[in-house]
Image (tube, rainbow, N blue to C red):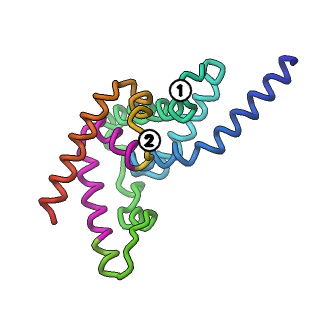
Amino acid sequence: MSPEAAQEVAAEEFARIVAALRPQIFRFLLSSTRDVDLAETLTQDCFLKAHRNWGQFRGESSALTWLMRIAINLEKDNWRNRRLQFWRHTRSHAVDLDEASEWLPSGERTAEQQLLAQEQLKSVWKVVGNLSGRQRSIFLLRYVEEMELNEIALALGLSEGTVKAHLSRALARVRGEIGSRV
């Protein structure tokens, strides 16, 4: 196979991966940042960085795990920059919690039950937003992205036991805070 043909095959493979995994990467970043514009920017940065380094992807993990690791690192870098330049972030760009709760199926039928579900969702988001960065990432990867513990461990470069411990602490805090509000 000629070098040009090999490059074309690699480009097509990368395009298929982008098409298949972009929604998951975006959803994780949106859940993590709760800012549509920022999530979109970080998603684009993730795939740009992945494209630049595609030749170095060894396949030791799934493409999703590799991309999620890139996304997590970009989100961490962004968080560090935001802490230094917090004045740039305005509430006008944040996703409205009521709007976000409409995206998530509640399974409720009555207006009262839907309102209760929205209030509970607000409470969960508030508690999750106050978790440590690592606990928040693990919580979101497990319950928003539905990743397995071993995949989370690979994506974050942690042992599975460490992931379990952080997830357990995050769950205890969410349950404790939500339980005290109900």
Dominant secondary-structure state across the stretch colored magenta: helix
- To which residue does mark 1 refer? 61
Q: Which secondary structure, mark 2?
A: loop
* Mark 2 crowdedness (10 Å alpha carbons): few <14, some 14-19, many ≥20: some
Identity, as a three-letter code, of the amino acid under mark 1: Ser
The reply to whether the magenta stretch includes residue 163 is: no
Q: Is residue 94 above or below residue 99?
A: above
Q: Is residue 169 above or below residue 143?
A: above
* Mark 1 crowdedness (10 Å alpha carbons): few <14, some 14-19, many ≥20: few
Query: Which mark, by number, is residue 160?
Result: none
The quadrant of the picture occupied by the C terminus is: bottom left
- Image point 15% across, 59% down: which residue? 179
Residue 150 lies left or right of residue 23; in this view the side is left
Which stretch appears magenta? 117-143
- Image point 72% across, 33% down: which residue? 13
Q: Which secondary structure, mark 1?
A: loop
Residue 47 falls in image quadrant: top right
The quadrant of the picture occupied by the N terminus is: top right
- To which residue does mark 2 refer? 147
Residue 121 lies left or right of residue 22; in this view the side is left
Residue 105 lies left or right of residue 40; in this view the side is left
Identity, as a three-letter code, of the amino acid under mark 2: Met
Q: Position of residue 14 (x, y in %)?
A: 69, 33
- Image point 54% across, 35% down: which residue? 64
Task: Give the CA separation, mark 1 to mark 2.
Answer: 13 Å
Residue 91 falls in image quadrant: bottom left
